[in-house]
Image (cartoon, helix red, strand yellow):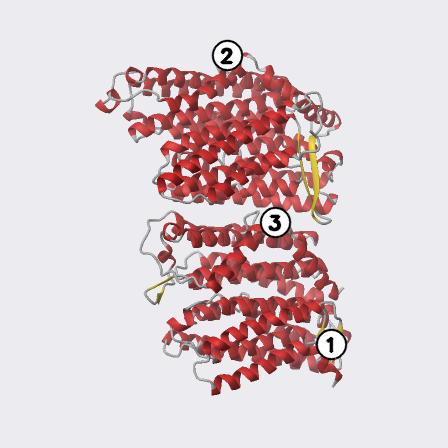
């Protein structure tokens, strides 16, 4: 019973979820209230976790770990979940998905992600993944009246179920060859000579790579991103990726530590493939959500590149990268959600024409975000990439670094293209000005963070250094 | 004096101006007027700050002065700035050219003037930052950050093919720079510091020096630009608005030359000696090939752009002959080219504003309607081809002397470039200014107005003053340049690549 005292953030979210479910069922028109309450609850969780940031516990018979690393990731997840509700503005109402279930699903997937990053056991990890994914499947098809949304939900579900199956098969192999599902025992018993456990490792990595949409398991991403309602797409691009990377780190650096050489090769391949495909495939996209999907793929490639060297510096670089990535994506999706005219939301990048003249402030923010995504100094995105490359070069993986840098130049092209459309092309009609407080808040804070990150870069780096020390 | 962080102040004065510009509100006329005043004032204050630094500068000290250092990223990068004679000369060039650019902008740019001025001031901060920074990471930040405003200047206020040129400029430069980034990270891992002052005193592993040198070279060669990666420059120049071209020609290109002297020679002396012949070959090709290309251009700006590539060829030769004359000459050549080529671009801008075309064939007989303009244009043309008495001559002759000392053949080919530069410059002048009056438009041209005088006069003065009294600049750079070349000659005596 004592163990439950230590997982109060999770318990808190579960209780809130149940409470809101009941409230939602019995209270008519409770959407706005529940939305605000959910945002508040998610944000409230952050100080709770931060206050006990340096806890280091293994609870439930070593099957659930609470430490600085999991707390760090949890805080990022909370921020992204909260902001994916904050910056939506009028969107729900306009496309008529203002149903309280939306919040319940966000909450439950957040809980799933918490379990993913804290799990110290394959079963726990699997349960976390499933809780998160099932909520996401439903979320992506929440716009029932839209054919595309339903289609993307089905696509996501079928492919997601397949990957879960692969993952589970991997778990069973690892269990069979090491005799346990607990990470610590797995790492003790893992033998790199046994083909079975290596197979298990590969299957588990495939399952996780699918969840973070790394090449070659990325096929679902563009379609699901395009089909889902934009607010859901934004959520997809934020929290699940962070949680996926968290699970990656947790499992690679604890359970499969002995098999370092084996998974390093896989990671190098996945990361190079993601970086290249993400940058090249995005060039041809004209739907901005698809473009963000490919951009997300290439960013995941960079994050995984940080893990490939298998060093503590690398983990720290990846954590920094993911934090900055989340901030950049929050800003980017706020801008994308802004593009509506007469209740129609536009997704074609050509609709951004002349944004700089009609909405100079939004355009300027978007411009900063895009330069940052492209990794141009002195914006935050540059620092994020810089730490990754520093970690990679420190481990003398020059090929990975060069490929990463070259693909970052390629990806600069399509980010620049959006800037070109906003600034260099002739203007068209104005968009609706529906910048509520939430929209402004999230856009300006995130842009300012990106713009002025260089003033004190140490803060984030110190936090992620502390978090990654857990694995030393 | 030493208590005030004057360098930091100078770097960030333009940014303060940008802040003011952001908060100007009102109707378009008011915004344009006020923002031009604010921008002008900011750039003039910056100029005076740099003059103040010059006044307090110790000419005899070859080391870094006004050094400031603060913790920034713990255990990794310090914010460190400082200047020696070489950097100060480039800073003066920057702060001297920027007010002229702003003045040239005010009446020729109508659309979104305030935003244009903001980008110009941002550029100024980045450029001063590049020349001040004594930490490789800071240097890289400033070096790369300059891409953003320049991209916007070309893309928003440029000519017809502006999108293509802006992209080409951005991607070329970014592609070059990533190799420098790899090299910088490697230096950090190898040496444990990115402090330039410290790095200058330790020897970087000889096996890796060549790769690191190539990494830096990739970036600087694109920016210089050297043949064969020069093709972005003519496009960027042609499409950029006048003041964009001026900034590009006068200062952005000089960042690379400065980088060669400070980092390639300073940090990798061994590799520099090894690669010197390679640089010579590229430079000689640049000088002769681009001069020939310049001969056949129809567009005035393009012609001047190609001539810039040729002039920068002299600069790279001067740097890599390693003796004092060569290095001094190349710095002199860069400063002088900064003044003269920006003046030429402004001259083109003057008639472009009136005629709306840069095609040489549309001109002829301009001297009849614009005699004063023709005189000024003449001075700059002669300066560009290196006539004694103009600043262009001093730079070229010093580089050639240095080159003759080092290698007879390099000097021989470089001299051919001098002849060719006379050909294309004079021919351009003849076709535009002399001859019969081509059309009525030219007959009705009005001569320079007051604003254009104010813009061009300082440039004429500087061209002639530096031509007749080169000591003004040479005294400033001599001790620092001497130190660089001494260091290089010491290495050459023990080097295995030469002899």
Q: Which chain does the numbered disc 3 sit on?
A: A
Tell me the SS state at disc 1. helix
> Gap between marks 1 and 2, in whole Å?
82 Å
Q: Earlier in the sequence, mark 1 or mark 3?
A: 1
Q: Nearer the viewer, residue A134 or A21?
A: A21
Decide if residue B91 is in sight here.
yes
Kindly identify which residue carries mark 1. Answer: A186
Please determine if labels 1 and 3 lie on a single subunit.
yes
Compared to residue B310, the image places residue B470 above or below, namely: above
What is the chain identity of the residue bearing mark 2? B
Instruction: Say which mark, if any, is on residue B389.
Output: 2
Q: Quadrant of residue A446?
A: bottom right
Observer-side mark, 1 or 2, equals 2
| Alpha carbons under labels 1 and 3: distance apart | 41 Å
Find numbered disc 2 in the image and state the secondary structure of the residue it sits on.
Answer: loop
- Pinpoint residue A152: horizontal percent, then vertical percent: 43, 74
Say which residue appears at 30% left-offset and 31% top-offset.
B356
Seen from the viewer's position, the closer of residues B499 and B274 is B274
Mark 1 or 3, closer to the camera: 3
> Image point 54% across, 48% down: which residue?
A376
- Above or below, comparing residue A387 to residue B210 in the picture: below
Provide the residue designation for mark 3: A454
- Observer-nearest of B428 and B287: B428
Distance between mark 2 and mark 3 Cα atoms: 47 Å
Mark number displayed over residue A213: none
Quadrant of the image containing the C terminus of chain A: bottom right
Look at the numbered discs 2 and 3 and tell me whether their residues touch, using CB distance below 8 Å: no
Question: Is residue B90 found left or right of B192 in the rendered image?
Answer: left
Residue B494 in picture, x, y percent from top left: 75, 27
């Amino acid at each position: 019973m004592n163990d439950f005292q230590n997982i109060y953030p999770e318990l808190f979210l579960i209780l809130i979820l149940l409470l809101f479910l009941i409230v939602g069922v019995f209270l008519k028109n409770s959407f706005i209230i529940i939305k605000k309450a959910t945002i508040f609850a998610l944000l409230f969780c952050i100080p709770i976790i931060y206050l006990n940031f340096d806890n280091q516990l293994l609870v439930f018979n070593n099957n659930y770990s609470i430490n600085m690393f999991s707390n760090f990731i949890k805080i990022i997840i909370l921020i992204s979940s909260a902001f994916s509700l904050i910056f939506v503005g009028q969107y729900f109402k306009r496309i008529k998905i203002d149903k309280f279930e939306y919040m319940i699903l966000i909450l439950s997937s957040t809980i799933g992600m918490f379990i993913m990053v804290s799990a110290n056991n394959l079963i726990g990890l699997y349960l976390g993944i499933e809780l998160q994914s099932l909520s996401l499947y439903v979320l992506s098809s929440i716009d029932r009246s839209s054919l595309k949304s339903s289609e993307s939900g089905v696509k996501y579900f079928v492919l997601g179920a397949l990957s879960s199956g692969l993952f589970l098969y991997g778990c069973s192999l690892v269990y069979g060859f090491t005799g346990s599902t607990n990470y610590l025992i797995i790492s003790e018993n893992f033998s790199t000579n046994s083909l079975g456990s290596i197979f298990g490792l590969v299957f588990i990595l495939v399952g996780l790579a699918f969840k973070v949409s790394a090449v070659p398991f990325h096929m679902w991403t563009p379609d699901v991103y395009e089909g889902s309602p934009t607010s859901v797409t934004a959520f997809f691009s934020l929290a699940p990726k962070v949680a996926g990377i968290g699970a990656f780190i947790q499992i690679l650096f604890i359970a499969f530590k002995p098999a370092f050489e084996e998974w390093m090769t896989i990671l190098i391949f996945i990361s190079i493939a993601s970086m290249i495909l993400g940058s090249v495939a995005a060039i041809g996209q004209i739907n901005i959500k698809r473009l963000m999907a490919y951009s997300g793929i290439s960013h995941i490639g960079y994050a995984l590149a940080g893990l490939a060297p298998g060093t503590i510096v690398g983990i720290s670089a990846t954590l920094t990268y993911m934090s900055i990535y989340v901030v950049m994506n929050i800003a980017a999706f706020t801008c994308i959600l802004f593009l509506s005219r007469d209740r129609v939301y536009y997704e074609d990048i050509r609709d951004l024409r002349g944004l700089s003249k009609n909405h100079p402030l939004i355009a300027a923010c978007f411009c900063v975000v895009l330069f940052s995504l492209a990794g141009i100094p002195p914006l935050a995105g540059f620092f994020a990439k810089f730490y990754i490359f520093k970690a990679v070069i420190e481990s003398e993986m020059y090929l990975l670094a060069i490929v990463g840098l070259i693909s970052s130049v390629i990806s600069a092209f399509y980010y620049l293209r959006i800037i070109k459309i906003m600034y260099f092309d002739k203007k068209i009609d104005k968009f609706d000005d529906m910048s509520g407080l939430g929209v402004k808040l999230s856009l300006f804070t995130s842009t300012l963070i990106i713009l002025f990150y260089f003033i004190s870069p140490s803060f984030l780096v110190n936090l992620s250094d502390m978090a990654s020390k857990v694995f030393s | 004096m030493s208590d005030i962080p004057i360098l930091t102040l100078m770097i960030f004065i333009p940014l303060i101006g940008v802040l003011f510009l952001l908060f100007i509100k009102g109707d378009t006329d008011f915004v344009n007027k006020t923002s031009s005043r604010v921008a002008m004032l900011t750039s003039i204050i910056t100029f005076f700050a740099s003059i103040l630094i010059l006044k307090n500068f110790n000419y005899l000290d070859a080391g870094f002065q006004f050094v400031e250092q603060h913790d920034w990223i713990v255990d990794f990068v310090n914010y460190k700035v400082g200047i020696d004679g070489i950097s100060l000369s480039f800073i003066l060039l920057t702060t001297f050219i920027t007010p002229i650019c702003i003045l040239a902008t005010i009446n020729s740019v109508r659309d979104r003037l305030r935003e244009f001025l903001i980008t110009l001031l941002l550029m100024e901060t980045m450029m001063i930052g590049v020349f001040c920074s004594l930490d490789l990471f800071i240097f890289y930040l400033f070096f790369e950050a300059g891409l953003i405003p320049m991209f916007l200047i070309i893309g928003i206020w440029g000519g017809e093919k502006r999108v293509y040129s802006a992209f080409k400029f951005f991607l070329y430069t970014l592609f070059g720079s990533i190799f420098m980034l790899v090299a910088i990270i490697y230096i950090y891992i190898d040496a444990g510091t990115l402090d330039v002052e410290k790095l200058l005193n330790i020897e970087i592993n000889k096996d890796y020096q060549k790769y690191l040198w190539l990494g830096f070279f990739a970036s600087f060669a694109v920016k210089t630009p050297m043949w064969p990666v020069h093709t972005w420059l003519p496009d960027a120049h042609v499409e950029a608005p006048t003041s964009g071209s001026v900034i590009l020609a006068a200062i952005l290109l000089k960042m690379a030359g400065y980088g060669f002297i400070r980092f390639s020679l300073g940090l990798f002396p061994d590799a520099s000696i090894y690669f010197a012949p390679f640089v010579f070959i590229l430079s000689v090709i640049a000088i002769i090939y681009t001069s020939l290309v310049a001969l056949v251009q129809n567009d005035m700006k393009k012609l001047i752009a190609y001539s810039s590539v040729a002039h920068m060829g002299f600069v790279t030769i001067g740097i890599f002959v390693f003796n004092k004359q060569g290095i001094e000459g190349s710095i002199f050549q860069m400063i002088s080219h900064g003044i003269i080529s920006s003046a030429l671009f402004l001259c083109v801008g003057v008639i472009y504003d009136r005629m709306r075309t840069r095609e040489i064939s549309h001109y002829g007989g301009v001297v009849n309607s614009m005699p004063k303009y023709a005189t000024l244009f003449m001075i700059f043309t002669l300066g560009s081809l290196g006539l004694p008495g103009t600043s262009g001559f001093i730079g070229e002759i010093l580089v050639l002397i240095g080159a003759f000392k080092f290698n007879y053949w390099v000097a021989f080919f470089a001299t051919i470039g001098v002849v060719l530069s006379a050909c294309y410059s004079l021919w351009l002048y003849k076709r535009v200014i002399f001859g019969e009056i081509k059309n009525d438009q030219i007959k009705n041209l009005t001569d320079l107005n007051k604003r254009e005088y104010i813009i061009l006069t300082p440039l004429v003065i500087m061209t002639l003053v530096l031509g007749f009294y080169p000591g003004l600049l040479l005294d400033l750079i001599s001790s620092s340049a001497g130190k660089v070349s001494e260091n290089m000659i010491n290495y050459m005596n023990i080097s295995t690549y030469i002899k």
